[in-house]
Amino acid sequence: MSQRLGQHFLTNTSKLRRICDALTLTEGDVVVEIGSGHAELTRHIFQHPVTVIAVERDSRLAALLARNFQFSIFNFQTMTNFQFSDPPRLLIEGDALKVLPRLAEMLQEAGVSYKLVGNIPYYITGRLLRVIGELQHMPTCVVLTVQKEVAVRMCAVPPKMNLLAASVQFWALPEMLFSIPKRDFRPPPKIDSAVIRLTPHAEARLDIRDAYYSLAKALFQQPRKTIFNNLRKSDFGNAGEEALRQTLDAVGVNPNDRPQNVDVSHIISLASTHV
């Protein structure tokens, strides 16, 4: 893919194989791959008896994939007429941020579970994680190659909690599997990468999702301030300072503590009081 779309192609065969292994593929699985590129990772997925649905934004690469790897190409603009009938190789040309919600919906309608994988352009990482986290039909497993520093932040726990970790851990359990040095990419990025696996929680708390994200944003708005000071001027402080202190105490959160020390379970408990 051209640099205008910000992708760096992973060329280390052993690392590509490890990414594929992280999906723990079994016969009959459906794998949605974001940004198949020149099929660097796709070739390894093809070695398993699975269905591959590739999402590729670059029209030139999409054409190459269709020609060289017998993909059935499907334009995103016509996806309203798409019916999933177990094609072994399906290519959707379009932006994954826009394609994924509709694709997940159609797979749900077809009663199909799926796994998600991709070496994603770094600039869409935050938005992509939010899109995945809000899917009505979640993948059973997500394996992504991201900036190493982002992977570390995503897996953080107290006393290093942060907004990204809180946002992701609301819907999935993250684990950083291994690092990838920048020399393993063409062209090489400026920093090292890491492969992260996200296992979505069995039960989604859709009833508190909006309240949770709003709370997390307010909580980490100024990480150096206390939890109380961050929340008292937000919607969570509308009932007054004393009520806020009582609510924090009731869920086991010290109002004078820093946000970095708050566990996801505490944020969930706080959000539950505000729905």
Image: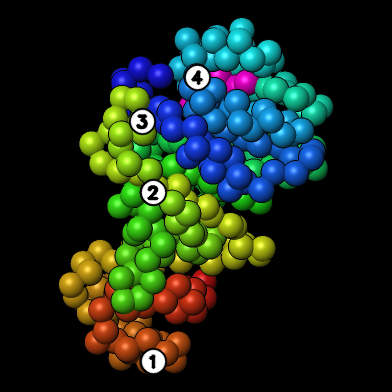
Task: Give the residue at mark 3.
Answer: 185
Q: Amino acid at mark 3?
A: Phe
SS class, disc 3: strand
Task: Give the residue at mark 1.
Answer: 249
Evaluate if marks 3 and 4 touch, with contact meaning CB atoms under 8 Å apart. Answer: no
Task: Give the residue at mark 2.
Answer: 179
The residue drawn where x is 74% and y is 40% is 29
The residue drawn where x is 39% and y is 49% is 179
Could you tell which of marks 1 and 3 lies nearer the N-terminus?
A: 3
SS class, disc 1: helix
| Magenta segment | 91-96
Q: Amino acid at mark 2?
A: Ser
Marks 1/4: CA–CA distance: 54 Å
Could you tell which of marks 3 and 4 lies nearer the N-terminus?
A: 4
Marks 4/2: CA–CA distance: 22 Å
**Looking at the image, is 46 positioned above or below residue 70?**
below
Marks 2/3: CA–CA distance: 12 Å
Count of marks placed on residues: 4
Mark 3 is surrounded, within 10 Å at the Cα level, by few (under 14), some (14 to 19) or many (20 or more) other residues, namely some
From the image, state whether disc 1 or disc 4 is nearer to you: 4
Q: Amino acid at mark 4?
A: His
Q: Nearer the viewer, residue 200 or 241?
A: 200
SS class, disc 4: loop
The residue drawn where x is 29% and y is 66% is 220
From the image, state whether disc 1 or disc 3 is nearer to you: 3
Could you tell which of marks 1 and 4 lies nearer the N-terminus?
A: 4
Could you tell which of marks 2 and 3 lies nearer the N-terminus?
A: 2
SS class, disc 2: strand
Mark identifier at residue 38? 4
Q: Position of residue 86 (x, y in %)?
A: 80, 28
Could you tell which of marks 4 and 2 lies nearer the N-terminus?
A: 4
